[in-house]
Every structure is written in structure tokens, then in C-alpha cells.
Image (tube, rainbow, N blue to C red):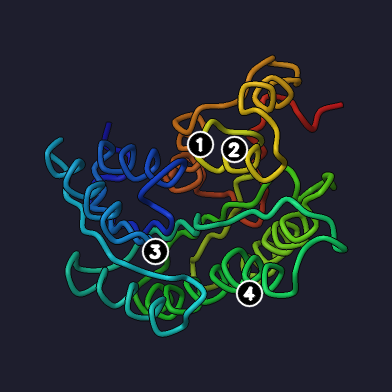
Amino acid sequence: MDRLEGKIALITGGAAGIGWATARLFAREGAMVAIADIHREAAEKAAVAITEEGGRAIAIPCDVSRADECKAAVEHTIRHLGGLDILFNNAGIIRRATVVEITEEEWDRAMAVNVKGVFLMSRYAIIWMAEHGGGVIINTGSGWGLTGGGKAASYCASKGAVVNLTRAMAIDHGPQNIRVNCVCPGDISTGMLVEEARQLDVRPDHFMEEAAARPLGRVGAPEEAARAVLYLASDDSSFVTGTTLVVDGGGLAG
């Protein structure tokens, strides 16, 4: 349980779902964790929970669509934890709608959080990492960043952008010893999945049954996605960069 011993990690969207499961796992593996989230109280509660378990964590309120807040989050992490070795760009939102149904404002917000947020956080993290020997960046994509999905135009577009942005950053910053990879979860049992059911006006239990229609016959747990992120963050993947790791119970296999 020491694969991240002495490492410092910044996780966006770290107060819930995959972000929270990853923050907790990272701390158990020896990392100091900065939990950045737009929901201040949830981030503070998550940091306290990790501290009570014997880890070290801080909370940072942050809207990843704002450059000033992303810059401040990176600076706060470095100042209070002593550096930055791992950035997990996990914050994301979804709006289940076609291009006809979605409003321009909803489209812009999805792009601002899901794509611009990755760009901004990575920019400020890379500046530090490049000057201090390197680091690791993991971006949260989606199975729908690799294939299309119904009534999810902005989400598919934004996650497809994240997948290819990952490749571009891996090429640009590999010479600086910065590895950049993407984890692409399928349906994971989080609040976002429940929110999708609400947006589609479908009963959550029916939605979950449909989401389980994959070779493994179930939706995933946040901890299962977190373990994939841990692999990409640790030296276990020391020669892996520019890749996409699909964690979806076989959903894209057929």
C-alpha cells in the first residue's frame, strides 16, 4: 500500500464519485491529496474523512472552467503540500440532449467544464512539473469519447476532445518526463448516473438495468475506476503515455 508514497496529487471533482474514490485510494497508497471541487463543503468533508483515516488531504474550492481558479488550485496545492506530482483531471458534467434539444448555454458549459477545465488545469500543472523533473496527468474521458451515444451530443463531443487532447499532450510533454493518459469509464454507479436518469425522465432502477447490459452484466463501482487511475498514476505504468484505458465491463467490446 505504498505505490504513491511521498507523492502529491491534485484531483478535480474529488469530492464525489470516481474522484472521491480515487482521492481515498491515493491517500491509502501514501499520497498527499488536494481535493478540488466546485462544492466547497463536500470537498472539505472529503478532506476531513481522509485525515481521519490517517492520510493527509486539503480541500480547494474550484470551478475548473475558470483560469484564475485553476491557477490558484495548482498554486495552493504546491504551497500547502510542497509540490505536485500527479494531476487527475476528473471534474465533468453531462447533459443528455441532442444538438436540437440542448441550449447554447448548456453546450458551452459542458465544453467549459469537460474540455477547457482539462486544458487549464494541465497548463498550470505542466509549468510546475516541467521545472521539477516531470509528473503524471490522468484525464477522465468516457466510453462515449470513443464511440457515439444517444441524446448526449455535448458529452460525446467533449469526451472525444479529452481523448485526443490526451494524445497531443503526451506527445508535447513526454520529453519533459510528463506522462499523460486517459481513463475511459463506462457506466459507473455514481450520482452522475442517477442524474442522467432524471434528465431522461427514466426511473433510476430501470436506467441501471439498461446500463448493466454489458458482458460483465453490471455497472461498475467508483473504486474499480479508481484502481485503473492508480495504475496510470503509479510507476506500474512508467512506460505508458498517450494511451486510453477503457474501464467499462466490456461495454465497447462488441
Foreground: 226 or 136? Answer: 226
Q: Are marks 1 and 2 in contact (CB under 8 Å)?
A: yes
Q: Amino acid at mark 2?
A: Leu
Residue pointed to by mark 4: 172
Residue 113 locus on image (x, y percent): 57, 67
Query: Badge 1: how crowded within 10 Å, few (<14), some, or many (20+)?
Result: some
Q: Which mark is residue 116?
A: none
Q: Are marks 4 and 2 in contact (CB under 8 Å)?
A: no
Distance, label 1 to label 3, CA atoms, is 17 Å
118 to 192, vertically: above or below: below
Tag 3 secondary structure:
loop
Distance, label 1 to label 4, CA atoms, is 33 Å
1 or 3: tag closer to the N-terminus:
3
212 to 58, vertically: above or below: above
Residue pointed to by mark 3: 38
Q: Quadrant of the C terminus?
A: top right
Q: Residue at x 56, y 60 (%)?
A: 180
1 or 4: tag closer to the N-terminus:
4
4 or 2: tag closer to the N-terminus:
4
Residue pointed to by mark 2: 193
Residue 84 locus on image (x, y percent): 32, 66
Residue 34 locus on image (x, y percent): 28, 59
Query: Badge 3: how crowded within 10 Å, few (<14), some, or many (20+)?
Result: some
Q: Residue at x 47, y 80 (%)?
A: 66
Nearest to viewer (mark 4 / mark 2): 2
Tag 2 secondary structure:
helix
Query: Badge 2: how crowded within 10 Å, few (<14), some, or many (20+)?
Result: some
Residue 218 locus on image (x, y percent): 64, 18
Distance, label 4 to label 2, CA atoms, is 34 Å
Q: Amino acid at mark 4?
A: Asp
